[in-house]
């Protein structure tokens, strides 16, 4: 036994091997756990933003989309965040494998645990509004982010496909409205045989289903309410102001007209 140990020591001397200080192993372990926590936290943040984007959609009237509800769902799935969350969870998996006891656990257990933790923490962040703030901050500061993430409101504002979304700017008559769509374009909307009963007045956001009949002209067969759970930040507003707040819409709401019953619509204007 002594000969073997002597050979080992002689070999160490020949190769000039030096002993690694214990603090390096400690530092390496701390960094690995820090990295694991980093990947899990940001993976959970990605999950919270995904939940925010999915919850922000209005899931009514999906039969008017090409492909129906499945086509709508396929279009609004936040693929960017799914890919990011997957990469972060993969990094967390490989980082955990390098920890002192990581080799003891099978892959399904590690992956399942990471996914479960991310979903639970992501749901908590979503409930606390963190996902919403992260999404709006990125949309406000990164123009390319707006283009990469498809929102349900974008799909509803496609007049050429028979869907128009916007805010009522004026009530011309019982069957005619002036609407500004999501892109700021002005539309003269003529109501024909509306099937849903909603209250229409200036400042109200609506979804119209019908067809384009001319330049800036839209004929609506059906009008649905648009009740977004939040609104994207307009570029001219500083971050942190809610464009759906009463303060932001005070001037527009103070000019709302009045009421008139019409083919399934009630418009507020006692003079009509």
Image: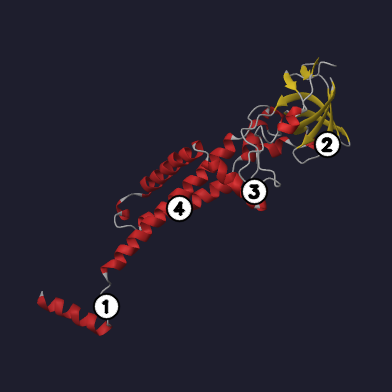
Q: CA distance from mark 1 to mark 2?
A: 77 Å
Mark 3 or mark 2: whose residue is earlier in sequence: 3
Q: Position of residue 16 (x, y in %)?
A: 27, 82
The quarter of the image holding the N terminus is bottom left
The tag on residue 186 is 2
Residue 248 is drawn in which quadrant? top right
Q: Which residue is mark 3?
A: 140
Element assignment for label 2 = strand
Disc nearest the viewer among 3 and 4: 3
In the foreground, 63 or 30: 30
Q: Alpha-carbon neighbours of circle 1 within 10 Å: few (<14), some, or many (≥20)? A: few
Disc nearest the viewer among 4 and 2: 2
Mark 3 or mark 1: whose residue is earlier in sequence: 1
Residue farthest to the left, as pictured: 2
Q: Position of residue 122 (x, y in %)?
A: 47, 41
Q: Alpha-carbon neighbours of circle 4 within 10 Å: few (<14), some, or many (≥20)? A: some
Is there CB contact under 8 Å for labels 3 and 4?
no
In the foreground, 225 or 214: 225
Mark 1 or mark 2: whose residue is earlier in sequence: 1
The answer to whether residue 270 is left or right of residue 128 is right
Element assignment for label 1 = loop
The answer to whether residue 92 is left or right of residue 263 is left
Element assignment for label 3 = helix
The tag on residue 18 is 1
Q: CA distance from mark 3 to mark 1?
A: 54 Å
Q: Alpha-carbon neighbours of circle 2 within 10 Å: few (<14), some, or many (≥20)? A: some
Q: Which residue is mark 4?
A: 90
Q: CA distance from mark 3 to mark 2?
A: 24 Å
In percent of the image, x 56 and y 41: which residue is there? 132
Disc nearest the viewer among 1 and 2: 2
Disc nearest the viewer among 3 and 1: 3
């Amino acid at each position: 036994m002594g000969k073997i140990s002597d050979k080992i020591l002689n070999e160490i001397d020949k190769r000039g091997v030096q002993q690694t200080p214990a603090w390096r192993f400690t530092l390496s372990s701390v960094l690995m756990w820090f990295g694991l926590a980093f990947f899990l936290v940001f993976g959970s943040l990605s999950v919270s933003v995904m939940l925010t984007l999915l919850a922000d959609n209005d899931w009514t009237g999906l039969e008017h989309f090409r492909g129906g509800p499945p086509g709508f769902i396929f279009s609004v799935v936040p693929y960017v965040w799914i890919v990011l969350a997957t990469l972060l969870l993969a990094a967390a998996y490989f980082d955990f494998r390098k920890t002192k006891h990581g080799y003891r656990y099978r892959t399904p257990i590690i992956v399942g645990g990471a996914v479960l933790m991310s979903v639970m923490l992501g749901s908590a962040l979503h409930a606390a509004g963190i996902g919403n703030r992260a999404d709006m901050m990125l949309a406000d500061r990164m123009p390319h982010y707006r283009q990469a993430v498809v929102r349900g409101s974008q799909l509803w504002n496609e007049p050429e496909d028979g869907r128009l979304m916007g805010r009522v700017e004026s009530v011309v008559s019982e069957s005619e409205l002036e609407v500004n769509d999501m892109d700021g374009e002005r539309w003269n909307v003529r109501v024909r045989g509306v099937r849903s009963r909603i209250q229409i007045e200036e400042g109200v956001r609506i979804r119209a289903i019908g067809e384009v009949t001319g330049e800036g002209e839209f004929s609506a067969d059906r009008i649905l309410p648009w009740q977004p759970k939040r609104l994207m930040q307009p570029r001219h507003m500083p971050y942190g102001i809610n464009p759906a707040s009463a303060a932001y819409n005070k001037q527009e709401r103070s000019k709302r007209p009045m009421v008139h019953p019409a083919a399934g619509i009630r418009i507020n204007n006692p003079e009509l």
